[in-house]
Image (cartoon, helix red, strand yellow):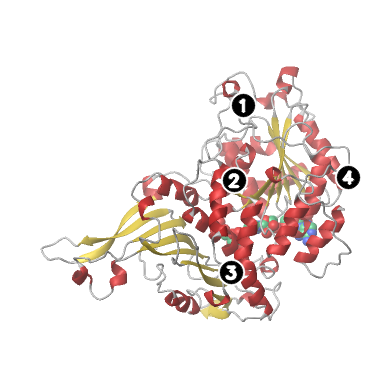
Amino acid sequence: MASACLNCYNHCFFPSFAHDKCQTTGTQLVQPRSNIPIAWMPRVKGIDRSRRRFGAKSSNGSPLDATCLGDGESHSLPLHKSFANLSEDGNFHISESEKKEPTISITVVGASGDLAKKKIFPALFALFYEDWLPQHFTIFGYARSKLTDEELRNMISQTLTCRIDKRENCSDKMDQFLQRCFFHSGLYNSEDNFSELDQKLKEKEVGRVSNRLFYLSIPPNIFVDAVRCASRCASSPAGWTRVIVEKPFGRDSESSGELTRCLKQYLTEDQIFRIDHYLGKELVENLSVLRFSNLVFEPLWSRQYIRNVQLIFSEDFGTEGRGGYFDNYGIIRDIMQNHLLQILALFAMETPVSLDGEDIRNEKVKVLRSMRVLQCDDVITGQYKGHKKGDRVYPAYTDDPTVPKDSLTATFAAAALFIDNARWDGVPFLMKAGKALHTRRAEIRVQFRHVPGNLYKKNFGCDLDQATNELVIRVQPDEAIYLKVNNKVPGLGMRLDRSNLNLLYSARYPREIPDAYERLLLDAIAGERRLFIRSDELDAAWSIFTPVLKELEGKKIAPELYPYGSRGPVGAHYLAAKHNVRWGDLGDETS
Ligand SMILES: NC(=O)C1=CN([C@@H]2O[C@H](COP(=O)(O)OP(=O)(O)OC[C@H]3O[C@@H](n4cnc5c(N)ncnc54)[C@H](OP(=O)(O)O)[C@@H]3O)[C@@H](O)[C@H]2O)C=CC1
Ligand SMILES: O=C1O[C@H](COP(=O)(O)O)[C@@H](O)[C@H](O)[C@H]1O
């Protein structure tokens, strides 16, 4: 049954895959064929906190439920004392009372890959360094590559220090961390290989109640195989089992629905953590705080005062090294349908009943379901072309050897979206996303309406647009929130200019901002689902974009070419003008 379903899923992703039949059992949890049960435990809500030795919390402030139930020692005691139990043969020996302390095993599936090296292992190390991980934990890398534990450690140690390297005791901490990292080589579709992994996990878990987290950092066509094998053969026997799934979650409504259906043959929705790393970014997290904890913003947050909202993503590099993946998806699927749309939903949602993950996701899904299906004439697409600047030659998208020479895949897109509800009726939400542009940036721009009957109209000169307020939430780089206000230029005359009330994070909070993956991993460990995508959110998100994607692809609409390193195609300006909008990032000297 599993492979039939997988074939169907592959068929949706890669039409060249043959599939005979696709049997599914709906969305109910299916008992695996093997005798090993799918074990999972919902988030432990009423856990006795007085028994916690280690007060780590999820990013929502709730305690980690993978922490040990111990003797009430404080956080300041050594967290990694269990190393004392490590004997020379690498095995742990622990007493009966220590066996009652739970442990967590984190398996990075696809450990030899780019994302694992670049983001996941460094994030795990940062959490370890900052004492956010539970006391007892083990990390396994799993991939087909034949690596020893030592080779995995060498490989990940190259990128481990990206955020922490200037900090105290970094190399000691790194050694301690690496001692907790192991590798198992296996195929993604082999239940035998996952059973071997299970044995190794059990050895490290030494009889403790173990919770298990699998991070699927692998190409999407093997998600379901890996989930089947992990669920059947390496689920935790007594603790919870959770799976973090990386995007892409399908490439349209149908393939996404199929992926969800296949995953739910082996996992419950509660076990699936669909990651959108933009939700883990500091300023995206702060959106709700800004809105709901300050009186000054929320009353203005509607069509009454806001003219338009702009969600802008740009990168100053191309698809270098990822052209093979990217060509099958394009920028609308890669950035807009997920990262920018998630930000939009958080930006536009009503006040949730509480900060509980389900309450927030309920509000987000309402926004998504109120959105108009995107129309083709509200989208423009672009693709970067090569060009030469001085001695430097910048490649075209189609120069990538993994991209077909005649590819029509968009590396840039701009779109106008609308939320047909009482709060946002008629307000354009403009999105712009592109690769190989002149700068790297992600930001939210909120342009407010004109002040009615403005007494100072004549002091602004002829450009009244320049006189409106604009709130900018710069997600990256140089995190900042600034508000453009009209101000009197000091002096005897009455000249006004537009200045910024500027909250620049590096000045106000001179500390490193954790990487998004750190927050998300911590939340997955804590069972906090607020920053992960629920399946109904995903369905609603795909419903907005699927028709236009089909139309663009069906009609083979050619993207407008723009030079590598430029500001993108001019079509983006026409689209904005059609909705009476001027992109705020043009000519903003703060940006
Ligand atoms: N890289 C990034 O910046 C981002 C990646 N993602 C997503 O994260 C996931 C992992 O990305 P990334 O690390 O770049 O992926 P990789 O292409 O590096 O693949 C990860 C590992 O999967 C195995 N693998 C690769 N191709 C195949 C294949 N055709 N069949 C079986 N195994 C294969 C390889 O391990 P081995 O051969 O050792 O088994 C590889 O090391 C993907 O879903 C991607 O879309 C999401 C956001 C950003
Ligand atoms: O998901 C993705 O995100 C990255 C950009 O992430 P950032 O945190 O570096 O801004 C993007 O490069 C990639 O194409 C996309 O798949």
Q: Nearer the viewer, residue 531 or 166?
A: 531
- Mark 4 to mark 1 CA distance (whole Å): 36 Å
- Mark 4 to mark 3 CA distance (whole Å): 40 Å
Amino acid at circle 3: Gly
Instruction: Work out whether mark 4 precedes mark 1 in sequence or the reverse, and give the earlier one.
Output: 1
Is 40 on the left-hand or right-hand side of 568?
right
Q: Nearer the viewer, residue 523 or 124?
A: 523
Instruction: Work out whether mark 4 precedes mark 3 in sequence or the reverse, and give the earlier one.
Output: 4
Cβ atoms at labels 1 and 3 below 8 Å apart:
no
Q: Residues within 10 Å of mark 3 (few under 14, many from 20)?
A: many
Point out which mark residue 318 bears: 3
Q: Residues within 10 Å of mark 4 (few under 14, many from 20)?
A: few
Point out which mark residue 192 bears: 4
- Mark 2 to mark 4 CA distance (whole Å): 30 Å
Q: Is residue 349 above or below residue 303?
A: above
Instruction: Work out whether mark 3 precedes mark 2 in sequence or the reverse, and give the earlier one.
Output: 3
Q: Of the residues tagged 4 and 1, which is closer to the observer?
A: 1
Cβ atoms at labels 3 and 2 below 8 Å apart:
no
Amino acid at circle 2: Leu
